[in-house]
Image (cartoon, rainbow, N blue to C red):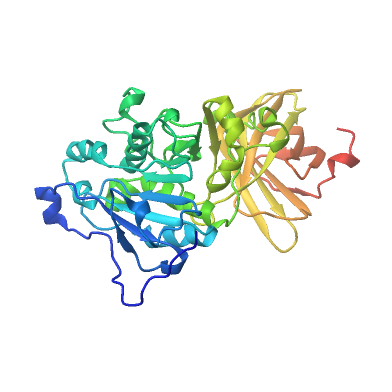
Amino acid sequence: MTSCFLPAAEKCEEMTDLDLKHSLTGTSLNVRLLFYTRANASCAQLLSHREPFNNSQFNLSSPTTFLIHGYRPTGSPPIWLSDFVKFLLNRRDMNVIVVDWNRGATNINYWKVVDNTRKHNGADLSSIHMIGVSLGAHISGFTGANFNGKIGRITALDPAGPEFNGRPPSERLDPSDALFVEALHTDMDALGYRELLGHIDYYANGGADQPGCPKTIFSGSQYFKCDHQRSVFLYMSSVNGSCPIIAYPCDSYTKFLDGKCMDCGRFQSAGCPVFGYDAINWKDTLVQLNQTRTYFQTNKETPFCKFGYKVDIVTWNQKTHWGYLTIKLSNGQKETQVELNHKYLMFERFVKSSLLALFDTDIQSVKEITLKFFSWFLSSKCHQTVVLYFNRPLCRYDLLLEENKDVTFRPIPCEDSNF
């Protein structure tokens, strides 16, 4: 079946745009389905929400993605909506349906909006991919449950926590709602959900505070929505294919930062899964494992990805010292630095410590490494071996680190060493 082009005179539909007045008084639920294809990427057409696939412009041979927004306290359309649609259509030829339930999502009474999430009607096709933001994630779950989990894929972007935390699977999103369910957590300590919801759950930067987001209430509305909204921009970046982010299976964020979760042996030759749109390539393994918790770190802005080395430290000093390190990599033209201070390390004789160093920039052909040691006490010295490796092995030995003093050296490739 082929796609049909839209007549030039066809009216372009837009998402419902409400204001604070509607937020105060509340609105009745009125779902509108806005339909996009590559032929009308910037001109939405209105579909029947009861029988969307009977529309003559629908290409049944193409996959279909539903994009479902969340709670809209002031009634304005999401700022990311048009870019998200464009990224999806650029990625592949598909039908994109934006579920406009702004009439029903616009209400200061959040609990009334929670009730509205259960009234949405969905469709049953294995080629369906539902991307739900916040409350939209649970809408996707309820839709999937109505069709006995036959929907192909559900992506939950920081699924809503209030009124859903602690609820049984029948009252929230869960892995049985689709053939493949993934959930990204970016604000689990406030607006988001904390526990596992999918076959794979990603906890970006630990799942709570996101880099670049305000830390105090004096920053205004961004303080409340930045962490929560970051989930959308992270996933959009994965759709856009800007830069792959590896998602490391791990029991906790602390273990991840300690470099204890770099081994993805359970995924065999496939290696660690990636976060986002291409995670579908790991579907069979993830579904078999049932529920997998993963972690990764990001930058504060697109393309978000960081580049990692595992750092092993063996100390030879006679006395025990506590402190942390900064590491700088340089290739003579570019440099990048990371401060490994998520916890204080104990530098003790013949004791090995491990950390994960994640840099903002990918430095190819590293020519120089600079270390700086910071101690709890002044005038501390420690004689230690430092080994850096992760995909591109780098090794070095016998470094004397003094308090707050740079030590720069050329790395020795690990294959040329005796380590």
Residue 356 in percent (x, y) is at: 64, 37
On the rendered structure, is 318 left or right of 373? right
Q: Quadrant of residue 393?
A: top right
Q: Nearer the viewer, residue 92 or 349?
A: 92
Residue 259 visible within the image: yes
On the rendered structure, is 402 left or right of 358? right
Question: Quick one: quadrant of the C terminus?
Answer: top right
On the rendered structure, is 247 left or right of 397? left
Q: Nearer the viewer, residue 63 or 103?
A: 63
With respect to residue 62, does 130 lie above or below?
A: above
With respect to residue 193, does 335 lie above or below?
A: below
Question: Which residue is at 23% across, 37% downward?
Answer: 114
Q: Residue furthest front?
A: 1
Residue 220 in percent (x, y) is at: 27, 52
Q: Nearer the viewer, residue 57 or 85?
A: 57
Residue 300 in percent (x, y) is at: 48, 52
Q: Nearer the viewer, residue 164 or 6?
A: 6
Q: Quadrant of residue 398?
A: top right
Residue 146 in percent (x, y) is at: 34, 33
Query: What is the tally of numbered marks visible in this picture?
Result: 0
Residue 274 visible within the image: no
Q: Residue furthest bottom?
A: 8
Question: Which residue is at 75% across, 40% downward?
Answer: 389
